């Protein structure tokens, strides 16, 4: 018996991204990041869009594909301890609505950044940033640790 447990999920990390409120907060935070970067006087529009894209993708990579485990005590013998948040979402099912949203949002941001930078030299930076966050989301990379990095 789990005394004091407020949730009914075995691992709350599996369902947290299915809420419309989380999606709305995510969009608001990305827009807020963009507005804050726009308020810095010596950044041009090209630099601001590239920075918005790169900072977003870096944060997404760290929080979804690098950090492992769960902040909650789970009764399943610590199985999520070896999984990233992306691998825990929706119990590892691919192409659910939350996975689609988190896969499409960096693509939309990439397209916006590419359009507003007029496909200049920032294009290569934005493309590398997009690939670094999209490739780990592919089903072929589920549970794969390249070169043993982040294995334990």
Image: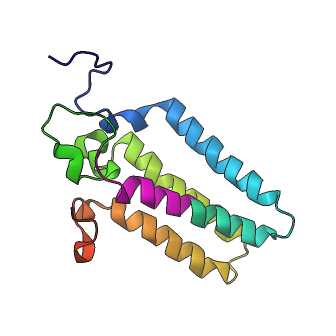
Q: Would residue 132 be found to the left or right of residue 74 on screen?
A: right
Q: Identify the magenta region.
A: 56-69
Residue 22, position in %: x, y? 51, 35
Is 144 within the magenta? no
The quadrant in which residue 139 appears is bottom left
Quadrant for the N terminus, please. top left
Quadrant assignment for the C terminus: bottom left
Give residue 55's position: percent from left, percent from top: 59, 62
Residue 107: tell me if it is visible.
no
Residue closest to the eye, 130 or 54 = 54
Depicted 113 relative to depicted 87: above or below: below
Q: From what the image shows, is residue 108 above or below residue 149?
A: above
As drawn, 125 above or below 115: below
For residue 49, which quarter of the picture? bottom right
Horizontally, residue 48 falls left or right of residue 82, namely right
Question: Residue at (75%, 72%) from the top-left corner?
Answer: 46
Work out whether residue 34 or residue 4 is closer to the camera in this orientation and state it: 4
Residue toward you, 97 or 21: 21
């Amino acid at each position: 018996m789990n005394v004091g447990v407020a949730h009914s999920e075995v691992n709350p990390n599996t369902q947290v991204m299915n809420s419309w409120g989380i999606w709305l907060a995510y969009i608001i935070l990305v827009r807020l990041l963009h507005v804050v970067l726009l308020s810095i006087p010596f950044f041009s529009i090209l630099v601001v869009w590239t920075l918005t894209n790169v900072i977003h993708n870096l944060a997404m990579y760290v929080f979804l594909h690098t950090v492992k485990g769960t902040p909650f005590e789970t009764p399943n013998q610590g199985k999520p301890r070896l999984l990233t948040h992306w691998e825990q979402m929706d119990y590892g099912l691919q192409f659910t609505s939350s996975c689609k949203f988190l896969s499409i949002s960096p693509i939309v941001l990439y397209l916006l950044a590419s359009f507003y930078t007029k496909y200049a030299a920032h294009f290569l930076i934005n493309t590398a940033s997009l690939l670094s966050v999209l490739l780990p989301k592919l089903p072929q990379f589920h549970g794969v640790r390249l070169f043993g990095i982040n294995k334990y």
